[in-house]
Amino acid sequence: MADYQLYCFAQSGNAYRAALMLNLIGADWEPKWVDFFGSAPQRSAEFRETVNEMGEAPVLVHGAKKLSQSGVILTYLAKRSGKFLPQGEDEELESLRWIIFDNQKVNGFLGPYRFLNTLAKPAGDPAVLAFLKGRALNNLGIVNTRLEKSPFLVGDRPTIADVSMTGYLYYPAEEFGFDIAADHPAIAAWLARMSALPGWAHPYDIMPGYPFGTSGYRNK
Ligand SMILES: N[C@@H](CCC(=O)N[C@@H](CS)C(=O)NCC(=O)O)C(=O)O
């Protein structure tokens, strides 16, 4: 058995943060596919009792530990590996600040928007979609402005704040109906810097669930 198991699925940008981090630190890990849109185990009483009481993916299993919330998982892996770890109190607080902003207001809006736009049957209410898109674009603009000033969110080197922020940003533009990278040049340049890191991989290549409805991978 691998050192780490990750409950995840290919369409989840929330889970991608954890999968990407495991890859970037060179961890020995294996995915446990959550058939989120099919049998939906995350909704079962058993999942909530034995895996995650919050009924969410990702969940990282490491020995007897089960961790949920991608920000917690990233913090744990950074502390264990010493990689992508913010250094000192100022950096720690700054990194946490961007992780919370990301979870709530960047990928926190993009994820539900993409779900209602592409995956939900029937698609979401147009007024809800317009609200989520407006919020997401406003907040992507804030991230873009930040990345015009520094190569990574917390300065000159990548930290877990950057890993978190990648969440949904590598998924194809057609899944959103707008092109985040084309519309935000500083985000595009930062995404290129992140994808040049050793161990980087696309969500569809490292988490099962591609194509939609299967437990496969894109390039395997
Ligand atoms: N803030 C959480 C978000 C996790 C999350 O919402 N995951 C989705 C899958 S992409 C989920 O499991 N949703 C189930 C639900 O909200 O009931 C994190 O970063 O881990």
Image (tube, rainbow, N blue to C red):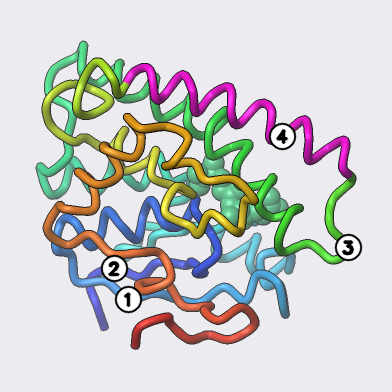
Q: Amino acid at mark 4?
A: Leu
Residue 137 among those drawn in magenta: yes
Mark 4 to mark 3: distance in Å?
Answer: 17 Å
- Looking at the image, do the residues carrying marks 4 and 1 touch, with CB atoms under 8 Å apart? no
- Residue range highlighted in magenta: 126-146
Q: Amino acid at mark 2?
A: Tyr
- State the image coordinates of residue 14 (x, y, percent, origin top left): 49, 51
- Please tell me how crowded label 2 is: few (under 14), some (14-19), or many (20+) other residues with Cα within 10 Å: some
Mark 2 to mark 1: distance in Å?
Answer: 6 Å
Q: Against 19, is 75 above or below? A: above
- Looking at the image, do the residues carrying marks 4 and 3 touch, with CB atoms under 8 Å apart? no
- Please tell me how crowded label 3 is: few (under 14), some (14-19), or many (20+) other residues with Cα within 10 Å: few
Q: Amino acid at mark 3?
A: Pro
Q: How many marks?
A: 4
Q: Earlier in the sequence, mark 1 or mark 3?
A: 1
Tell me the residue that label 2 is attached to.
4
Residue 141 among those drawn in magenta: yes
The quarter of the picture where residue 134 lies is top right
Residue in the picture at 84% in, 57% down: 123
- Looking at the image, do the residues carrying marks 1 and 3 touch, with CB atoms under 8 Å apart? no
In screen coordinates, is 109 left or right of 23? right
User: Which of 4/201 is in front?
Assistant: 201
- Looking at the image, do the residues carrying marks 2 and 4 touch, with CB atoms under 8 Å apart? no
Asked whether the viewer can see residue 195, the reply is yes
In screen coordinates, is 46 left or right of 182? right
